[in-house]
């Protein structure tokens, strides 16, 4: 980030600390797409992701005065958004469908098939996973949390976290083979 961009961001943060509606609106517009992308990575649909985005911005504006300016603002926003997505998952956990315990064939897609996938293909495949599988997969594989941390975040056992990750990977393999091996 260049000096002008850092200075602009610092001014924007300062305005939000002072509860300037204009600066809050500018910050919202600047980071909406970023926060929505994170929300979509963790939520079942766009409406739920919008709720996560709304919650995240409320928390951002409520706690912006505690932001450590020596840290990355974008990273801080990301952390808040992920926590809001996890909170949303916890609130709706009782409404999730039980997963089928079906064995997935161990036919692995060919390596050249995997090379054909682009980021949109991967995002679409992740979007087809049930919410609990997608959330555990994202937290473990993308965010780098371990199973103990995931179990604490989501209120599930460590062994359940491992199981959900394994199922997510199995389903992704199956979907890659089904969607792209035609």
Image: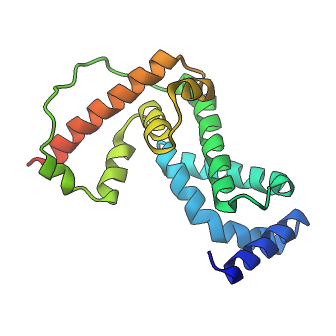
Q: Residue 125 in the image: x percent, y percent?
A: 32, 46
Residue 12: x %, y % from top left = 78, 73
- Report the residue at 76% width, 50% height from top: 59
84 up-or-down from 164: above or below: below
Above/below status of 84 relative to 94:
below
Look at the image and tell me in which quarter the N terminus lies: bottom right
Residue 75 figure quarter? bottom right
User: Where in the figure is residue 143, as x and y percent of width and height?
Assistant: 51, 43
Q: Residue at x 16, y 41 (%)?
A: 177
The vertical placement of 107 against 50, above or below, is above
Q: Quadrant of residue 155?
A: top right
Question: Relative to the observer, which residue lies in front, 40 or 137?
Answer: 137
Q: Residue at x 78, y 72 (%)?
A: 10
Instruction: Work out which residue is located at the far right of the displayed protein and give it.
Output: 18
Q: Which color scheme does this rendered protein use?
A: rainbow
- Count the marks: how many? 0
Residue 170 at x, y percent in the picture: 27, 30
State the residue at coordinates (73%, 73%).
Answer: 9
Instruction: Determine the residue located farthest toward the left in the rendered image.
Output: 182
């Amino acid at each position: 980030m260049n000096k002008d961009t850092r200075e602009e961001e610092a001014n924007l943060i300062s305005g939000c600390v002072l509860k300037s509606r204009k600066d809050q609106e500018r910050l919202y517009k600047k980071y909406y797409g970023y926060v929505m992308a994170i929300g979509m990575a963790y939520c079942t649909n766009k409406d739920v992701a919008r709720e996560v985005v709304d919650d995240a911005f409320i928390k951002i504006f409520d706690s912006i005065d505690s932001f450590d300016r020596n840290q990355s603002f974008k990273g801080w926003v990301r952390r808040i958004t992920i926590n809001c997505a996890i909170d949303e998952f916890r609130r709706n956990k009782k409404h999730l469908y039980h997963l089928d315990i079906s064995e997935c064939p161990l036919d692995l897609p060919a390596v050249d098939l995997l090379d054909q996938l682009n980021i949109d293909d991967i995002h679409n495949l992740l979007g087809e996973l049930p919410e609990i599988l997608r959330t555990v997969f994202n937290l473990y594989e993308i965010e780098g949390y371990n199973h103990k941390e995931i179990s604490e975040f989501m209120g599930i056992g460590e062994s359940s976290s491992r199981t959900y990750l394994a199922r997510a990977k199995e389903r992704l393999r199956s979907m890659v083979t089904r969607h792209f091996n035609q």
